[in-house]
Amino acid sequence: MNQFLKNYYHWIVLGVAVLIALVSAGMLIPQQLGLQDSLTALATATKATKLPAPQPSTDAVNALAGIKKPIVWAQRDDGASMLVSRPYLLRNGTLIDPMEGNEPLFPPVPNKWLIDHQLDYTDVNILDRDPKHKGFTVLEEFKAGTDPNNPNVFPPLATKLTYSTGDISKGTYTMDFIDGEDDEGVMKFELRPLQPIPNPAKGNRPDTSPRSVAKGDTVPGAPFLKVVDYQPMTKTINDTEYDVSQLILENTLTGEKLALTKKFGSREYKALPIEIIESVNFHYQLTGAPEQIVSVQRGKEFTLSSLDNKLTETYTLNNFSTGGILLGKNGKTFLVKEATAVSPVPTP
């Protein structure tokens, strides 16, 4: 027996394997047929009941949309980015956070203003820069309330005007208030110029003859001077009463009020000189451009242009005041101070 198994061992193993295969096939064939019948029945039922097709996963749809529209990193207000922290400055061995505290790095400009306008506050000369080459420094834009990064918005061009005393040509008007009298119910006042001025009654030939003017009228030969008030006044000196009545004139170019005291009313009388500008040579210099000389006569218009000549502004030279030279533009008044830039002043 042992000899038989030894001689036919491989045939016996092959027979057993064939037998196992036949048994397995006999078991799987019915199951396959049953599965096929089940799938056929399911397809028939789906078609009969018109079930909706399965929908894609919501999560998968959202994920696909996110891939198509990646998130863009937005710059933060404090200057930080995805890989860089908010900026700090090292000053005197100490780290300074420009976003904290009230001490400006470049007085008088607040740190937040520099950051809001995307300006490099690490630049020690930032206030003298002109980021968009508009002809104005960052400091000048801050004072004017304009955006240094907006190439279409400018501070008033007149803020770049300067002058010195030697650039001014003045005219002086000095008048004596002689007296006042009633002329057919109208109070008229007699004025006598101490320097020759045009006399309308004599073909505008300059002379020093007296002029009669009523309240509300301008002085003949000096049309910029208007009589606006009369104030009767007396003053007692050493038991003697003197008539020190005053005639109030208005410089219509500046709005300034001038009081002329009656000449023969008091020993303290002093003539009041009235100065007005006849002409001036302005120095006009935009940042990054050579200086220009702009010669203007009183009451005349003149035009200023931006660095690229895309903007022009027209001003009128009104007059001289104790604070500087007054310009007018579109109903606004600008004061040009000696050897300095100008600043807007309220219009009366």
Image: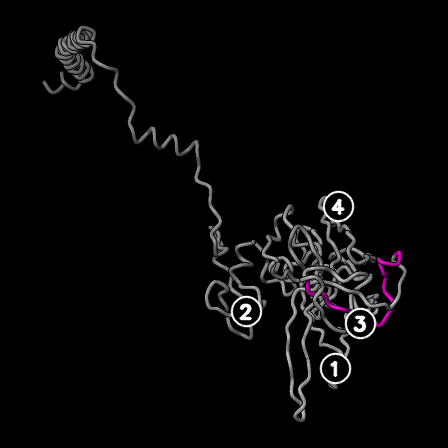
Residue underneath mark 2: 90
Residue underneath mark 3: 174
In the displayed structure, does residue 42 sit left or right of residue 273?
Answer: left
The local crowd at label 4, few if under 14, some if 14 to 19, many if 20 or more residues have their Cα within 10 Å, is few
Secondary structure category for the residue under label 2 = strand
First in sequence, mark 4 or 1: give its number: 1
Q: Position of residue 182 (x, y in %)?
A: 70, 66
**Could you tell me if residue 341 is visible in this image?**
no
First in sequence, mark 4 or 3: give its number: 3
Give residue 269's mark. Answer: 1
For image coordinates 71% across by 49% down, the residue present is: 313
Q: Amino acid at mark 3?
A: Thr
Whether the magenta-drawn stretch holds residue 227 is answered as: no
Quadrant of res 180: bottom right
Asked whether the residues under the numbered discs 4 and 1 touch, taking CB atoms below 8 Å apart as contact, a structural biologist would say no
**Could you tell me if residue 187 is visible in this image?**
yes
Q: Position of residue 268 (x, y in %)?
A: 73, 85
The C terminus lies in which quarter of the figure?
bottom right
Q: Tell me where the magenta segment starts and ends, as one range.
A: 186-203
For image coordinates 54% across by 68% down, the residue present is: 104
**Rounded to the nearest whole Å, what is the CA distance between mark 4 and mark 1?**
54 Å
In the displayed structure, does residue 291 sit left or right of residue 246?
Answer: right
Viewer-side label of 2, 1:
1
Viewer-side label of 3, 2:
3
Q: Amino acid at mark 4?
A: Asn
**Rounded to the nearest whole Å, what is the CA distance between mark 1 and mark 3?**
13 Å
Identity of the residue furthest to the front in this view: 184
Give residue 309's mark. Answer: 4
Secondary structure category for the residue under label 4 = loop
Viewer-side label of 4, 3:
3
Asked whether the residues under the numbered discs 2 and 4 touch, taking CB atoms below 8 Å apart as contact, a structural biologist would say no
First in sequence, mark 1 or 3: give its number: 3
